[in-house]
Amino acid sequence: MSIRSMTEADLPVCLSFTQQVKWPHRLIDWQLHFKLGNGSVIEANLDSHNALSAPQIVGCILWWDYPALNTNTTASSSTSRLGCATVGLVVVPDAMQGRGLGRTLMNTVMAQTGERNLQLVATVAGKRLYEQCGFTTRSTIYQVQGELTKKPEFTDNIDVTEVDAGSLSAVIELDNQAFQADRSALLKALMARGRCVIAKQNGKALGYAFIRESGRGETIGPVVASDSGVAKALAAALLQQTKAFVRFDLTEHASDLKGWLTDLGLQQVDEVSLMVKGEWLAQQASDSQVYSLASQAFG
């Protein structure tokens, strides 16, 4: 077996792996994650009788680099200045399970990321491997999705407006405060793929939210807000205009938002662990919090 860098030509095979485990990714979703990330695949010759047969991909992994903020922003500790990376789309097909391929993939990423703080969202099946790699559970993520049975109402005292590429700087600043690392490249890519709204009160920016086509329908995230009322106002503005299947990956900050969404007809379908190796930078946030992830892979 050998490990090498992922190429765009590998994506159909990687897509087939996520389809086997019933993850909802489409090829276009894989392309976005690949474009923004750093991928590796494991190859093996599965024909033991023919040493010259073409090797086949038997596992994949990606990680996304979020550099440290400039020293004049909110990041201050020495570990914060390392920045962080999220890890995701770690898949080994069923037929190749039990051969240590998952550990090889994780060792590859940990070597590539160096001293960065690492974050991932773990399924039940993967959690033991990540614990063996030094990750600890720090929070819970709730997958809430479905189709609305009723439309949400707007919050009158919060002004929610559309954001364009030219006014994305306020959104990036809010995200810096909440995530404590630089995700500007991710936000710009999401802006090109979907829509963004920002919430203000008396001219002060209080939060933002993105919506884009993804998976079975649309994904709303990231959602960053100063409190649950702002998060609801942002979600309401986006949900008012959607008729499709919609998904949120909610953090523990979003308990009020989760209850509100289920009242609107969505359902919690999964509960997974947010795990960290090193420092969890978002824990340092004060004025703004992440209420919904961009994706379980992106964070």
Image (cartoon, rainbow, N blue to C red):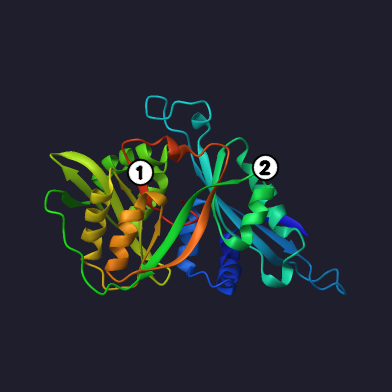
- Work out whether residue 52 or residue 61 is closer to the camera in this orientation and state it: 61
Q: Say few, some or many: other residues with alpha carbon within 10 Å of mark 1 (under 14 / 14 to 19 / 20 or more).
A: many
Q: Going 35% across and 53% down the picture, which residue do you hit?
A: 254
Image coordinates for residue 87, horizontal then vertical, percent: 56, 51
Q: Amino acid at mark 2?
A: Ala
Q: Going 52% across and 26% down the picture, which residue do you hit?
A: 78
Element under label 1? Answer: strand
On screen, 224 above or below 204? Answer: below
Disc 2 vs disc 1: which is toward the camera?
A: 1
Can see residue 5?
Answer: no
Asked if residue 278 lies left or right of residue 49, the reply is left
- Work out whether residue 57 or residue 89 is closer to the camera in this orientation and state it: 89
- Work out whether residue 33 or residue 159 is closer to the camera in this orientation and state it: 159
The residue to which callout 2 is attached is 111
Residue 289, label in figure:
1
Q: Earlier in the sequence, mark 2 or mark 1?
A: 2
Q: Quadrant of residue 114?
A: top right
Q: Quadrant of residue 97?
A: bottom right
Q: Quadrant of the N terminus?
A: bottom right
Asked if residue 101 lies left or right of residue 294, the reply is right
On screen, 265 above or below 251? Answer: below
Gap between marks 2 and 1, in whole Å? 30 Å
Q: Going 51% across and 58% down the picture, which residue do you hit?
A: 272
On screen, 48 above or below 260? Answer: below
Q: Are marks 2 and 1 in contact (CB under 8 Å)?
A: no
Asked if residue 103 lies left or right of residue 213, the reply is right
Q: Amino acid at mark 1?
A: Gln
On screen, 92 above or below 255? Answer: below
